Amino acid sequence: MFKKFRKNLLQLAFIIFSLYLFVLVFLYFYQRNLLYHPNENNYSGDKISVKIEKVKIRTSDNIELLGWYHEKNLKDFKTLVYFHGNAGSLENRIHKLNHFQDMNINFLIIAWRGFSGNKGKPTEQGLYEDGKSAISWLLKKGVYEKNLILYGESLGTGVATHLAQNKNYAGIILETPFTSMIDAAKTFYPYIPVSFLLKDRFENYKKVKNIKLPILVMHGEVDQIVPFSMGKKIYEIANQPKYSYFTKYDNHMMEYDEKLVSELKSFLKSLN
C-alpha cells in the first residue's frame, strides 16, 4: 500500500514538474508576445487638434518608423521627444498630445518597430535604436541637444532613461516608470524565475543614477500594472534637480487633467 502511494506521489510530482518546465519554456520563447502589445487599442475616438506632420524616420538597421511631428518654433522653444508605452498605436496618445498645443514646445512622437504599421519586431535593443534614430532625426533638423526633452511613458521610460544617461539634454519626464522589467515581471509571475528567463530587462534603477538632468516623475498610487512603489523608488534615487507628481487615485493610465497638465507646464517652464 505504501509503495503504491509513493509511486503515485512520484508520478504526480513528475507531472507537476513537467508542466512547470513546459510553462518556463513557453514563457522563454513567447515572452515578447506577452510584453509588447502593438494591437491593443485604448483609442476612444479623440480628434487630434494640434497640427502634426506625419514623418518617416529610418533606423540604422533600415527600419522605417512612423512619427508625428509638431514644429512651433525650433529656435525659441524646446523640443520634446515622446516615447510611448507597450500597447497600442499613436492614436492612443491623442488625448495627451492635444494638451501640448497649449505649451511652448515642439514635439515628436514615434511608433516603435512593430507598432502602428511599422515593420520589425520590438526588442530592448531595437527600441533603443528607435529612440536614438528619433533623436538623430531631430538633431539633423537643427535642434540642439541642450534643447531636447525626453518623455517616457511606462515602457518608454526604459528608453528615455537609457538615452538620457550622461547627456546634456534639457530635461526628462518619466510617466509611470518601473525600476526594472525584472521587478515588474515578478509582480505578475512571482513563482517564475524571471531573473533567469527575461531577455528585455530595461534596468531603469541603474541608469537613472547616470542622469544629471532636471527630472519629473509622475505616478499614481493605484497603478495595477507598475506598482507605485517603483515610481517612488525611481524618484528617490534620481539626482537633483528632481520633481514629482504623485496622485492617490490614478491608475496606470494617468488622468491628463488640469492638475497634471499644470505640473507639466511648470516643469517645462523651469527648463527655460
Image: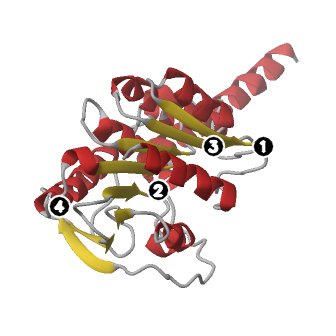
User: Mark 1 vs mark 2: which is more N-terminal?
Assistant: 2
Secondary element at tag 1: loop
- For image coordinates 35% across by 76% down, the residue present is 117
Q: Name the residue under label 2.
A: 36
Q: Mark 1 points at which residue?
A: 248
Q: Where is residue 259 in the image (x, y as percent from the top left)?
A: 68, 54
Q: How crowded is mark 1: few (under 14 residues within 10 Å), some or many (20 or more)?
A: few
Q: How far apart are marks 1 and 4 (CA)?
A: 38 Å
Secondary element at tag 4: helix
Secondary element at tag 2: loop
| 258 with respect to 64 (left or right) | right
Q: Residues within 10 Å of mark 4 (few under 14, many from 20)?
A: some
Q: Which amino acid does label 4 sit on?
A: Trp
Asked whether the beta carbons under mark 4 and mark 3 sit within 8 Å of each other, the answer is: no
Q: Where is residue 165 in the image (x, y as percent from the top left)?
A: 29, 32
Q: Name the residue under label 3.
A: 219
Given residues 13 and 88, the one toward you in this image is: 88
Given residues 122 and 116, the one toward you in this image is: 116
